[in-house]
Amino acid sequence: MLSVADAFAITQQHILTLPTETVLLTDADGRVLRAVVRADRDFPPFDRVAMDGIAIRFADYATGQRTFTIVGMQRAGQPQLTLPQQTGSNINACLEVMTGSILPIGADTVIRYEDVNIVDAQATIVIENVEIGQHIHPQATDRRAGNELLSIGTRMGPSELAVAASVGQTMLTVTALPRVALISTGDELVDVADTPLPYQIRRSNTYMLRATLALLGIQATLHHIVDDEAILTDRLTTLLAENDILILSGGVSAGKADFVPAVLARLGVQKQFHKVDQRPGKPLWFGTALGKTVFALPGNPVSTVLCAYRYVVPYLRTSLGLPPAPVRYAQLAEPVVFKPNVTYFLSVRLSSEPDGRTLAHPLPGSGSADFANLLTADAFMELPAERSEFSAGEAFQVWGKV
């Protein structure tokens, strides 16, 4: 049976190749960039005033001048003014300047309003220390024209969209989203709106999966197929033709009604592995077929969630062109004993401590079918197979939401 590491590696060896598409800037939120965005001009594009106040020539200040006549105002968004030169007996001039405005020609220093006293258009500096160039954001100090601002693989969020807008990118080249079908199987499952009979339950796993994929910007369709081999074959044939990825929940264990592996093989989906040395989620099935990918997850809710976090989400991130999610670790808040020699994914509640540590609090549960336990679990802690006792304070990797 495959180890968790080997199973994960196999999924990453069969990454889906997705095309690119061009979308409007306003439609690019959450999308993954596939073409570099560069500065179309210097950042900032001019010597930018960083504080409201007055702009002076430092050489005038250096000669001992402390009072300046205000001869105009440089507002943000207005053409550049010129600070007049001192001529003859004229007193030194200054210009009022607003934050974000271009620095007037001839000025090289800005004094904040808080540091001057203005009476009858006369501005007197009331602080002792003034430095040349203060409160000025010089041209090109952030980026120069042509510099890379957003790299391939960047996920577009609020800051990234603002940067793209600032350089006039009305359209962006991004990874096309995969077509994904989420499929529940089983005669015991009924629709959310239905009242289940005593031997039935409502469908829930595909709703969890759909919400998880939505965090990556992927909108998946929901389907349900009963435990009938002919119906399963017919429906999966259609869904394989219409989608890039199928994610099934249920029908992959060793029961007599678990038809999924045999049907997928009949449809030409090549099994890459079936069963992983882990708990929960042992019956996980993964296969590929000519640009298609199939994950068949165990139907028990906790197993479905764990396999989604540990395998499906990283697979989708790589397919979209995103870098791996940051590795997260937490320390066990109390000892744990787990005897079976398999990788154990412990349901935990995470807490952030004042000393900076992240603690993982083990949650009691009733196994992989304990759906309600997921409400209080923040993540799964991956405990290695070669051990059975784990001490409080030990740190292990945790897997959770996108």
Image (spheres, rainbow, N blue to C red):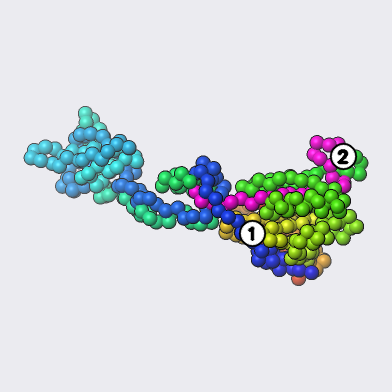
At horizontal 22% and vertical 44% (from top left) the residue drawn is 105
Provide residue 346's location: percent of width, then percent of height. 75, 58
In the rendered image, which residue does mark 1 sit on? 16
Let me know if residue 366 appears in the view: no
266 or 76, which is in the foreground? 266
Residue at screen point 61% across, 47% down: 217
Outermost residue, left direction?
A: 88
Horizontal side of 88 relative to 157 (left or right) equals: left
Where is 169 relative to 399, above or below? above
> Over which residues does the magenta segment extend?
172-196
Task: Evaluate if marks 1 and 2 touch, with contact meaning CB atoms under 8 Å apart.
Answer: no
- SS of the residue at dot 1? loop
* In this picture, residue 163 sits left or right of residue 290: left
**Left or right relative to 140: residue 354:** right
Q: Report the residue marked by disc 2.
A: 196
Does the segment drawn in magenta span residue 181?
yes
Residue 198 falls in image quadrant: top right
Locate the N terminus and report the quarter of the image it occupies. Answer: bottom right
